Image (cartoon, rainbow, N blue to C red):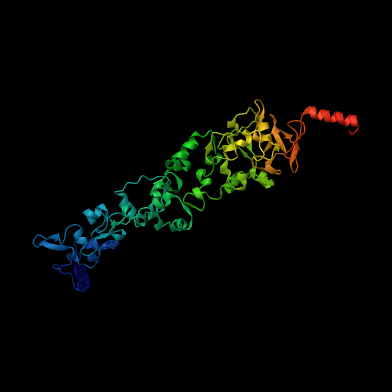
Amino acid sequence: MRFIMAAILLLSGLGLAWAESKQTTDKTDPNCMASGCHDGLARQEFVHGPVGAGQCGVCHETADRQTHKFKLVEQGTELCYFCHLPQNTKKHIHEPVKKQCLECHDPHGSKAKFLLTRKDANALCASCHKLKEKKFLHGPVASGACIACHQFHHSDYPNLAYRPEGQECFECHAEMEKSIKEHAYVHKPAVENCRLCHTAHSSDVPLQLKKTGKALCVECHENIGKEIQNAQVPHGALNILDECLNCHGAHTANMPFLLKDKPMNLCLTCHDKEVETPSGRKLQNIKKVLDASQFKHGPIREGDCMACHQTHGSSNFDLLKRYFPQSFYDDFDLKNYALCVSCHEQSLIMQERTTTLTRFRNGNLNLHYVHVHQEVKGRTCRVCHEVHGGNLPANVRKEVPFGKRQWLLPLNVELTETGGRCSGCHRPMRYDRVNPVDNSIQTEEKAETEKQNTGSGP
């Protein structure tokens, strides 16, 4: 009802002001501005409605006509709420609203919109909220639009936001809200609270991030941070370009762990060329190797580089997850085969006789066992097998780097239906799973003698 009364007073005041403007100046004129005392109040760029209508009585009433003293018809915020809807009815109320509207607004007129007591909203907010200006400013801060993020008077949400905590940024960043709905995997801070990673007002880091690169990520991902810090062999991708974001999406992705693509595709964005390590060692172009390989190692076929490699850092060369000897020869120790036996049966190299564990056997003699079980100069897996892929079954090598100069030693492998033949590390020797071959020198010498005696030699 009081709002209706206020409207009637304003409308009648407008009519009275027009009527008075038609009369000659009268020293008993009740209009405070027309009297020549307070006429400056109506000359501001923005004028309060009652002042513009010449209706001072909406807010003021005579206390003592003889002394020309006036009093407000209501005290504090209740006076403003006589015309304006109450601005203190929600859960979170701006402190000035609790006390006095005049902390922010001029009751008569102002050079600023909304009768603000400062030149603009940004200057007004800054008069209480001292922001340390940094190198990068959030757009609304830079343009002086605090109201883009905050309601001025009251809100149902913390910080006088327009939306619940964790959703307030979507008021402007609608594309991010859409991305969260459309992607299978979402970074928790993106839906819980953007301010876990970003500052709301300003930062010395681009995009209002709290810290740069991986320093920000490891604040939450402490286990990964320790892994990176303790790695004897760090992943080079973490120290170039976008660091963690070379592989991971910051907000959303369609792959687990927020990966930007399938793991193997990601690896080949860098390993599609030779890569030089900080020590000067050159890593081969893996994409070129795979493209040229008819047969591929199991993890490669499954696109799972992480079956063998750590993604952030490792204590083993080439980011391998477990120990794998770099040498051609090594005295037998099961730890030398830790990486391979994490997938392959340990018995493949530990069992001397078998008819099922491997096709690489002479009768039931396990030739894997024969090659590795040497007290001196046992052959490591890399001697006979390519680690990524090759053009012989079981990724058997055609040649292997040997010695300091990495001479390519040919293995001269020939495969048959039931066995094969090889040489390079040793004299030519054959094996057969069905009809075991006697490769002893004595046997060969005896056969040669028999040939000569019977005249069946060449």
Q: Residue 273's x, y, as percent? A: 64, 43
Relative to residue 235, is residue 42 drawn left or right? left
Q: In the rendering, at what x and y percent does residue 173 appear?
A: 43, 56
User: Residue 22: horizontal and vertical position, in percent?
Assistant: 21, 74
Q: Quadrant of residue 18?
A: bottom left
Question: Which residue extends farthest left?
Answer: 66
Q: Nearer the viewer, residue 229 or 134?
A: 229
Figure quadrant of residue 65:
bottom left
Q: Is residue 22 above or below residue 422?
A: below
* Rendered location of residue 280, percent (x, y): 62, 34
Q: Residue at x 28, y 61 (%)?
A: 44
Q: Where does the N terminus fall, quadrant-wise?
A: bottom left
Residue at x 13%, y 60% (from the top left corner) = 70
Work out whether 309 lies above or below 115. Answer: above
Q: Is residue 228 above or below residue 151?
A: above
Picture layout, residue 265 above or below residue 63: above
Query: Is residue 362 left or right of 225 when viewed as pictured?
Result: right
What is the count of numbered marks? 0
